[in-house]
């Protein structure tokens, strides 16, 4: 059991009085009116002795009933996106509890420093893009990436739509013009990676473990643009170790999206990312790589986001080289040239909440890995990545743990090499291997 610390990048959060083991969500949804009725059963453990526990739930959703272990708590309040329960008796540290929340409303995105995050209506359907703090836009949760849990999603929606959540489709039951879908995600998952995708999609196989849900009009373009994902998986398995989940699904929305986004076992692209010419293949590789870096190995605090984005960006360069494009070294030199002409005011090992998704962090994170690779040599570098993903599989990670792992695995004092890349502002020079 862990007691996740509050993340300074996300102020106003509950301070981790719960460690959630499993969420069971039962959602009844009408696409036509964007009306959601939900029941969430949250199986958790108290991380300290307390009479007060809390979950986050967006204020657009109204709570009608809360039970704790089958009984009404002393009282509960739902204000400012925080559902606070005062228990009848103090619960001991380490004791289990089940919080059962009934809620309903018209969900929508959370607005904050990162724009609109979480639940979003499409022209004809829904996407959920939870990174970094959008999970409470559709279910009550302890929205800390360090608090991974198992999930069951049961969603009932109008017939005619494909409904996708994370994990394995267990049952699909049509009934009176509606369909009930049940998904089970047994691998531990951070709340921000939980997703729901609803649309009028075709399901197409894009590989032995890969499928895509695409609007019928984009079927051929998507089949072509996603056609090399199996080769990407093979390349990444070779470099990063086994693919960490049972399957991989890509959803292509009929609407355009500003950026694609990753969820666990799944990625979402906009119609604009499928041009039928592999114009966005770099991003296809990027999102796939997040399954290892971000989803299986998840930074427990957002300050360590380079462990997601730097690695996913480096994976783009590896794919470029393997698929006959520019080599990783050429990509690194080009990126270094561009970064050296931009302001050097970013510490990627602790960028601050406003710069978490700054492109300079992505590129400099990838350059950090390239510098490490140049120093260690290919064999030692890729062995390190495979050890890293194996040791922390489905877990929570920090930059310090990566530095320690790199030193242990390589037998070299690489922390000194990593430091200026990660914790100083000025851009280090790229050395030639
Ligand atoms: Zn990314």
Image: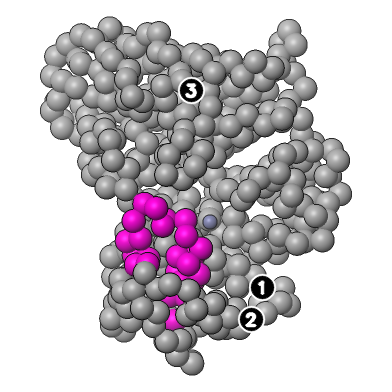
What percent of the width, then of the height, locates residue 68? 29, 14
The first of marks 2 and 1 along the sequence is: 1
Q: How is the image coloured?
A: one colour
Which image quarter is the N terminus in? top left
The answer to whether residue 304 is magenta is: no
Nearer the observer, 361 or 241: 361
Q: CA distance from mark 1 to mark 3?
A: 40 Å
Q: CA distance from mark 2 to mark 3?
A: 45 Å
Is residue 233 something one can see in this rendering? no
Is residue 7 something one can see in this rendering? yes
Query: In the figure, 316 relative to 129: above or below?
Result: below
What percent of the width, then of the height, locates residue 366? 49, 71
Query: Which residue is drawn at the image coordinates 14% and 14% (left, top)?
Result: 89
Q: Are marks 1 and 3 in contact (CB under 8 Å)?
A: no
**Local secondary structure at mark 1:** helix
What percent of the width, then of the height, locates residue 251? 68, 42
What percent of the width, then of the height, locates residue 129? 54, 40
Q: Which residue is mark 1?
A: 320
Mark 1 nearby-residue class (10 Å; few <14, some 14–19, many ≥20): some
The first of marks 2 and 3 along the sequence is: 3
Taking 413 as reference, is 305 left or right?
right
Query: Which residue is drawn at the image coordinates 20% and 9% (left, top)?
Result: 74
Say which quarter of the image contains residue 147: top left
- Depth check, mark 2 against mark 3: the one in front is 2
Q: Which residues fall within the magenta stretch?
A: 346-371
Query: In the figure, 113 relative to 153: above or below?
Result: below
Q: Which residue is mark 2?
A: 327
Query: Which residue is drawn at the image coordinates 64% and 81% (left, top)?
Result: 327
Which residue of the protein is positioned furthest toward the bottom in this rendering?
Answer: 432
């Amino acid at each position: 059991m862990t007691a996740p610390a509050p993340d300074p990048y996300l102020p106003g959060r509950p301070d981790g009085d719960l460690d959630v083991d499993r969420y069971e969500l039962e959602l009844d949804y009408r696409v036509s009116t964007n009306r959601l009725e939900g029941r969430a059963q949250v199986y958790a453990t108290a991380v300290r002795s307390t009479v007060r526990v809390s979950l986050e739930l967006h204020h657009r959703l109204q709570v009608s009933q809360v039970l704790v272990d089958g009984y009404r708590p002393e009282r509960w309040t739902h204000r400012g996106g925080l559902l606070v329960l005062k228990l009848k008796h103090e619960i001991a540290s380490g004791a289990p509890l089940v919080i059962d929340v009934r809620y309903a409303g018209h969900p929508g995105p959370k607005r904050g420093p990162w724009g609109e995050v979480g639940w979003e209506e499409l022209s004809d359907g829904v996407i959920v893009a939870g990174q970094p703090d959008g999970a409470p836009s559709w279910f009550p949760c302890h929205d800390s990436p360090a608090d991974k849990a198992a999930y069951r999603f049961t969603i009932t929606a109008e017939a005619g739509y494909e409904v996708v959540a994370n994990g394995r489709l267990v049952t699909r039951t049509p009934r009176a013009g509606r369909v009930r879908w049940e998904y089970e995600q047994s691998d531990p998952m951070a709340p921000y990676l939980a997703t729901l995708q609803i649309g009028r999609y075709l399901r197409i196989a894009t590989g032995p473990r890969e499928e895509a849900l695409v609007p019928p009009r984009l079927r051929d373009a998507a089949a072509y643009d996603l056609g090399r994902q199996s080769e990407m998986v093979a390349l990444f398995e070779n470099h990063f170790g086994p693919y960490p989940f049972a399957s991989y699904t890509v959803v292509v929305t009929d609407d355009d999206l500003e950026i694609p986004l990753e969820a666990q076992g799944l990625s979402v692209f906009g119609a604009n990312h499928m041009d039928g010419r592999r114009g966005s293949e770099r991003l296809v590789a990027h999102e796939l790589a997040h399954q290892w870096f971000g989803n299986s190995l998840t930074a427990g605090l957002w300050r360590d986001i380079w462990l997601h984005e730097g690695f996913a960006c480096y994976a783009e360069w590896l794919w470029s080289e393997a698929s006959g494009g520019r080599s990783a070294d050429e990509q690194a030199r080009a990126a270094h040239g561009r970064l050296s002409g931009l302001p050097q005011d970013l510490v990627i090992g602790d960028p601050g909440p406003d710069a978490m998704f700054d492109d300079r962090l992505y590129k400099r994170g990838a350059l950090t890995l390239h510098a490490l690779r140049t120093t260690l040599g290919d064999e030692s570098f890729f062995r390190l990545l495979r050890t890293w993903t194996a040791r922390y599989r489905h877990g929570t990670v920090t930059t310090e743990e990566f530095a320690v792992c790199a030193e242990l695995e390589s037998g070299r004092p690489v922390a000194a090499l990593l430091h200026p890349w990660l914790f100083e502002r000025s851009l280090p020079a790229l050395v030639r291997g």
